[in-house]
């Protein structure tokens, strides 16, 4: 706190924000949390529906197989083969 002409002025940013802005900020955070929850629930619902009705998206399975193949190739590349030399 500092004083100018015998008037106390808060110096922290949190103290300087008007109450309307802080209230708006709190409401905005609540809305964002609620929307994140809704998106998560909807994603779970869509995945369950796809599994229940055996829905496949063209190209999606191919991408998963390519990723698995790439991982297998990388694992094979990491293997080291050593031939012992006898003298």
Image (spheres, rainbow, N blue to C red):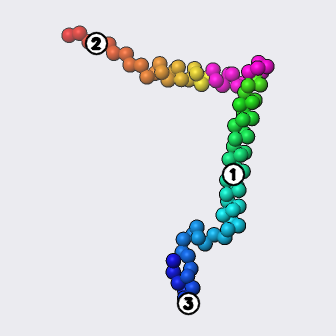
Is residue 21 placed above or below 84 in the rendered structure?
below
Give the quarter of the figure containing the C terminus.
top left
Which sits earlier in the primary sequence, circle 2 or circle 3? 3
**Residue behind mark 2:** 84
Q: Percent x, y for residue 35? A: 72, 45
Determine whether the residue tagged by mark 2 lies in a helix, strand or loop.
loop
Cα–Cα span, label 3 and label 1: 40 Å
Determine whether the residue tagged by mark 1 lies in a helix, strand or loop.
helix
**Residue behind mark 1:** 30
Determine whether the residue tagged by mark 3 lies in a helix, strand or loop.
loop
Is residue 44 placed above or below 13 in the rendered structure?
above
Specify the label residue 11 is tagged with: none
Furthest residue to the left? 87
Q: Residue at x 37, y 16 (%)?
A: 81
**Residue behind mark 3:** 5
Which sits earlier in the primary sequence, circle 1 or circle 2? 1
Query: How many labels were placed on the picture?
Result: 3
**What are the residue bounds of the magenta stretch?**
51-65
Q: Nearer the viewer, residue 63 or 48?
A: 48
Looking at the rendering, which quadrant does residue 19 occupy? Answer: bottom right
Is residue 56 visible in the rendered structure shown here? no
């Amino acid at each position: 706190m500092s004083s100018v002409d015998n008037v106390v002025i808060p110096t922290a940013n949190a103290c300087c924000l008007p109450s309307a802005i802080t209230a708006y900020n709190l409401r905005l955070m609540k809305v964002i949390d609620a929307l994140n929850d809704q998106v998560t629930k909807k994603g779970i619902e869509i995945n369950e529906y796809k599994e229940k009705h055996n829905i496949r998206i063209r190209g999606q399975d191919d991408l998963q197989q390519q990723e698995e193949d790439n991982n297998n190739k990388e694992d094979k590349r990491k293997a080291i083969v050593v031939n012992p030399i006898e003298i």
